[in-house]
Amino acid sequence: MQRRTAVRNIAIGFGGLFALPTWASNWNINTLQSNSFLILYQQNLLAEIAETIIPQTATPGAKSLGVHLLIEKIVSDCFGKDVQEKFTKGLGLIDDFSKNTTQKSFIELDMTKRLQVLKSIEKSENNDLKDALGQIKWMTVDGYQKSEYFMTNIEKFEWAPARFKGCTPMKK
């Protein structure tokens, strides 16, 4: 192999390392662009499901951090049309289950009823319904833990935490 080709390949490799999907770590609500495949009702439904999974307490909830926008972006950018259709079908299944059990859509319920609906879904025999909720739950928790708020205020993440303290006395 030629030296110039090798150096060029190494440079391209390092460039690729630095250009890894940085939008998925330390993201915040302002860094996400709307490229939605969901209709407005489905966007609101996803936001309410995420808020039910991680509600706002002394710390911001999933909805106020925009976790639902991250989930939407990941599904629209990283998955094909078949997965996107399955995702929207899963949102519809969750809302239909809510309508069948409580006679109200998931968005219209208060927080305690929403929790009851989600717990009922986990105990349900319908695997498509359980899979849809499991995927949303996993993506909500993962997105919350990768948010800028979580990484800076809860996790206390430091980009380069290594420190050298050379003049430290040794204890006997």
Image (cartoon, helix red, strand yellow):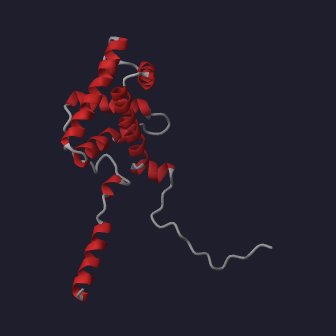
Q: Is residue 119 left or right of residue 96?
A: right
- Residue at 33% in and 28% down: 128
Above or below, comparing residue 68 to residue 41 in the picture: below
Locate the C terminus and report the quarter of the image it occupies. bottom right
- Residue at 38% in and 45% down: 143
Above or below, comparing residue 65 to residue 131 in the picture: below
Please name whichever residue, 114 or 88, is drawn nearer the observer in this view of the structure.
Answer: 88
Please name whichever residue, 99 or 112, is drawn nearer the observer in this view of the structure.
Answer: 99
Place residue 79 in its image quadrant: top left
Q: At which x and y percent is residue 20? A: 31, 62
Q: At which x and y percent is residue 113? A: 42, 18
Q: At which x and y percent is residue 132? A: 34, 32
Above or below, comparing residue 69 to residue 25 in the picture: above
Q: Is residue 62 left or right of residue 15?
A: right
- Residue at 35% in and 41% down: 67
Q: At which x and y percent is residue 77? A: 23, 48
Q: Is residue 57 left or right of residue 84?
A: right
Please name whichever residue, 109 or 134, is drawn nearer the observer in this view of the structure.
Answer: 134
User: How many circles with numbers are drawn on the protein?
Assistant: 0
Locate the N terminus and report the quarter of the image it occupies. bottom left
Q: Residue furthest bottom?
A: 3
- Residue at 33% in and 21% down: 106
